[in-house]
Image (cartoon, helix red, strand yellow):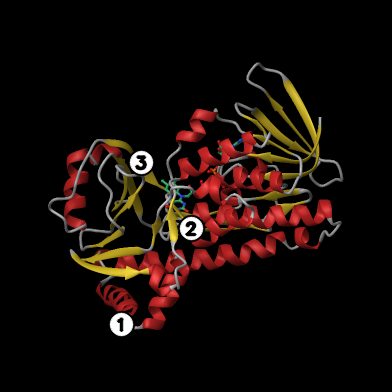
Amino acid sequence: ENVEVVIIGAGPAGLTLANLLQRAGIGCVVLERQSRSYVEQRQRAGVLEHDGARVFEEWGLGESVLAGTSSDGRLEIRLDGRPRFFDVAALTDGRAGRVVPQQVLVQRLIATFLEGGGDLRFDAAEVTPHGLDGPTPAVTYTDADGGRHEIACAYVAGCDGFHGVSRASIPEGALTTYTYDHGVAWLTVLADALPPRHALFGIHPAGFAAQFARGPRASRFYLECGTADSLDEWGDERIWEQLRLRLGDPDLPTGPITEKLFVEMRCFVADPMSYGRLFLVGDAAHIITPMGGKGMNLAIADANVLARSLRAALREGDEGPLAAYSETCLKRVWDHQEFSRWMHEMMHEAGNATLAGPFRRQLARARLERLFASDAAARAFADLMA
Ligand code: FAD
C-alpha cells in the first residue's frame, strides 16, 4: 500500500487533520488503536474556542461539525461564594467559543470523514513507524484478525496522544523536552447533573472547584485535592458536600456520578514537534492542564497548521511551511502554557492560603480584582479565553 500521509491516532488532532487533508484532496489513512465505540465515548474537553470553530468553517466543515452547538460567551467566578460575571463575548467583539463536548466533536469528525470516503482503521495494534529520517517512511500495524500490514507514505502525522508511539520513535537527543508539575492535584467528576448556565469557577479557602456543561444534562466538575489523596477518600457524599461549599451553592443540582478520576496537573512540551518526515500534533507533542481549556484547542490548531503545510509541500512544491511547522505551533503552545499557568496561580492561590501563603493570596486576589476593575485587563484575559 502507498498513501501520501499516514495519521496515527483518531483523537481530535488526528481526526481534524484527516478531514482537512480530505478537503485538500490529499490521500491519507488513519490508524487507531482503540475501537470506534471507545473513541466515540471518551469524554474529556467541552469547549471549542472561537479560533477552533473558525478552522472548521474555513475548510467548509462548519455545518458538519458545529450544527446545533450553542455559543458559550460568559463565565462566572464565585469568590468565597459571591458571584462575579465575566462577559467574554462582549469583551472580544463576539469571539466566543462553542459548547462542543469532545466526544461529540470526535463522533462528527468520524462520520464526516467516512461519508467523504475516508480510510479509518480502528483496532490497529502494534502501530510502528519506520524510516522517518529517510525519504520513504512507512508504518506497519496488525489488524484485529492478526494480519500484518505495511503502508508506505510521504509523511507520518503522530496524533497519538501523550503516551503514543510516535514521539517514542524519535531517537533520544533529537528532542528537547520541558516538563512542569503544578504541585497540586485535581479530582474530576462527570455527573448526570444539570449544568450551570455559564462556565463556573469557585475560589474558596477549602480549595478550588469548577463546573462546566458537558451536554444538556451533564456536568464536569473539578476539585482541588491533596496530591497523595486516593479515590477511596473521595466518596460521593464528600464530593457533593465539597462542591456545595466551594461553589457557594447549598442547592447545587446533583445526579449520578458516571466518572471519577485524578487529573495529571503536569505540563509537557517537546521541541521541535517533528523529526524527519514525522510531525507531532496535539497531545503527542505537548500537554497542558485543563485550566483555561486549551488542550483540545491546541490539537486542532496544530492540525490546521500541518494540513496547510502538507498541502503546500505536496501540491505546490513549497516545503517552507512544513519546515516552519514546529516553530509556528510552538509559539501558540507557549503562549497558552503561560496563560494556563497564570490563571492556575490566580484561581488556586486566591482561595487556599496554605498553598502559597497569605501574601501571595492577597496578590492573587488583586490579580482577580484587576479583571473587574480595568477594561484593558479584562480584554486581555477575555482574548486569551475566547
Ligand atoms: P488524544 O485525544 O489523546 O488522542 C490520541 C489518539 O491516539 C487516541 O484515540 C488513542 O487511542 C490513539 N493512540 C494512542 N496510542 C496509539 C498507538 N500506539 N497506535 C494507534 N493509536 C494510538 N482540553 C480542552 O481543550 N479543554 C478542556 O476542558 C479539557 N478538559 C480535559 C479534561 C480531562 C479529564 C482530560 C483527560 C483532558 C482534557 N483536555 C481538555 C485535554 C484534551 O482532552 C486533549 O488535549 C485532547 O484529547 C488532545 O487530542 P489529541 O488528538 O492530541 O490526543
Residue type (three-letter) at the residue carrying disc 3: Leu
Res. 261 mark? 3
Q: Measuring from the top left, give residue 362's x and y in whole percent.
A: 26, 77
The reply to whether residue 16 is visible in this rendering is yes
The reply to whether residue 174 is visible in this rendering is no
Residue type (three-letter) at the residue carrying disc 2: Lys
Give the left or right position of residue 269, taking residue 221 as reference. right
Residue that badge 2 annotates: 294
Task: Say what secondary structure mark 1 lies in.
Answer: helix
* Residue beneath the point at 28% across and 65% down: 77
Does mark 2 have its CB less than 8 Å from ligand 1?
Answer: yes
Quarter-of-image position of residue 268: bottom right
Q: Measuring from the top left, give residue 74's x and y in whole percent.
A: 34, 64
Quarter-of-image position of residue 111: top right
Residues under labels 1 and 2: Cα distance? 26 Å
Q: Earlier in the sequence, mark 1 or mark 2?
A: 2
Q: Quadrant of the N terminus?
A: top right
Q: Earlier in the sequence, mark 3 or mark 2?
A: 3
Number of other residues with Cα within 10 Å of mark 1, as a class: few under 14, some 14 to 19, many 20 or more:
few
Residue type (three-letter) at the residue carrying disc 1: Ala
Q: Is residue 277 above or below residue 33?
A: below
Residue that badge 1 annotates: 373
Task: Say what secondary structure mark 3 lies in.
Answer: strand
Residues under labels 3 and 2: Cα distance? 19 Å
Does mark 3 have its CB less than 8 Å from ligand 1?
Answer: yes
Number of other residues with Cα within 10 Å of mark 2, as a class: few under 14, some 14 to 19, many 20 or more:
many
Give the left or right position of residue 351, taking residue 15 as reference. left
Q: Earlier in the sequence, mark 1 or mark 3?
A: 3
